[in-house]
Amino acid sequence: MSKKIVAVTACAAGIAHAYMAAESLEKAAKEMGYDIKVETNGTIGAENVLTKEDIEDSDVAIIAADINVELVRFTGKKIYQTKSIEAIKDSKVLINTALESGEIFGKKGTKVGDITLGKTKEDGVIKHLMNGISYMIPMCIAAGLILAIANVFAFQKDELGRIVNWGFDTSTTMGFFMSKMFQVGQVGFKLMIPLFAGFVAKSIGDRPAIAPAMIGAYIVNDPEILGTEAGSGFIGAIIVAFIVGYMIKGLKKIKWPKILQPLVPIMILPLIATFAISVIVLFVIGKPIAGIMNGLYDGLTYLNNTHASAPIIMGAIIGAMIGFDLGGPVNKTALIFGTTIFTDTVAKYGIQQANFVPGTAAQAAISVAPLGVWLATILFKDKFTSTEKVSANAAFAMGMVGVTEGAIPFVASEPVKMIVANVAGSAVAGALVAKFGCKFYGGIGSPLGTIVGYIEQPIPIITWVFSISVGVLVTALIIGFSRKKVEG
């Protein structure tokens, strides 16, 4: 079947190499029986410009250029980038290489140097952790919102309206009902970490790993069973999940007698793994991990209470990580860290004293990159092509629902400028919500989160939207001032 190829050639001078490369590609494609259309970028501007239809119908796009070429229009298509000289030297080899080694541009998994945007390794640790978190999030949101709503009714006021005590007045119908709802929320948080561990272990060892991991994670987080002051938290659950997951994976490799095989997945493997992880938690890892985590969270709480700048610095770091690789490993690490701190401090100190800073900063920063590039196209219209403006509108839609990956095509096109802009703006948003003391309980990580969800903030709606908007503006200004005007 004949292949359809599109190409863009360009050189620094715009005189010879762009046209020599185009001629070489056209000649080679004709000899190979392929259809090709080549856009040249010379001193007189772009000629034989590729249309949207040309790009959509192509099997691969070859970018043989020595200068920056607008790549956003190739989002979702296989592209191969090289220098113009490679097309001049041997276009047949280049075409074959492009067809075999070209990569989808602007989607999850796009690579920029050593940075993978929007995606983690399919078999990596982060992948297993994110699998557990994806199952845990609905329970986290449900329990968090119920706790937050019930908590409003727990503040006792005097005749002048001043808050004088925290606690439910169970002598009233509403007070009694909300006290029960608060307990329901606490149950949700108690089950949340075992649920997380169960599905992390499932990601590694499949269904037989769920039950032993959940039981092990419950034990490692129960101070009464461990005989400790506090449980081992999220970290303890992660360790349990990985031990169980790989234990099950190993046990599945044993050649069990045929008579036992029907019982292996539903009884034998869960029984062995549950017994083993219980012994490991109770007599080996439980107390040491609990002691370490207790010290770490006490230290973190001390820093937050005694140094006003500590939450701001933490918020800025988490925000910067969110904006760095847009759903890649660094971004996912920040999300996991925020979730860890929140769930562990809720379990240790209660919802009133929980540390919301990392989790809230992550959610505030998550929409900054896509909204920032959209705003840049509005403020600096003469620095973006019509295709880039259309792509920016799509980024806006994704950003408003908390999908940071909407900015990937722009980062892939201009990595250094965009990563600097995204990191700076995201850090500002994270720092501001920490500075103002916002608390994200659940919802959408975007300006809409202040309506679609529950966020405690000094000025309802305004504080959250303002913090994110400042971060978006910082990103937009850096992008705009670092770009040149579009010619023609």
Image (cartoon, helix red, strand yellow):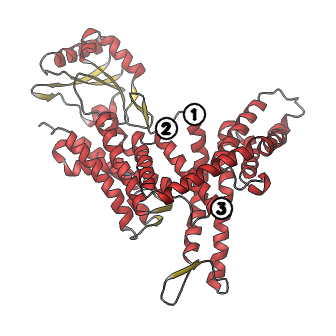
Residue for point 71% across, 44% down: 288
Element under label 1?
loop
- Marks 1/3: CA–CA distance: 28 Å
Q: Which residue is mark 3?
A: 188
Q: Which residue is mark 2?
A: 329
Residue for point 66% across, 68% down: 184
Element under label 3?
helix
Task: For residue 331, say whether it is visible.
Answer: yes
Residue for point 60% across, 57% down: 345
Name the residue furthest left.
44
Q: Earlier in the sequence, mark 1 or mark 3?
A: 1
Task: Please tell me whether residue 219 is drawn above or below residue 72 in the rendered image.
Answer: below
| Residue 49, quarter of picture | top left
Nearest the eye: 118 or 455: 455
Residue 132 screen position, x and y as percent: 62, 46
Residue 276 screen position, x and y as percent: 81, 39
Q: Is residue 427 left or right of residue 291?
A: left
Total marks shown come to 3
Task: Please tell me whether residue 481 is drawn above or below residue 45 in the rendered image.
Answer: below
Quarter holding the N terminus is top left
| Residue 483, quarter of picture | top left
Specify the amino acid type for callout 1.
Answer: Gly
Q: Are marks 2 and 1 in contact (CB under 8 Å)?
A: yes
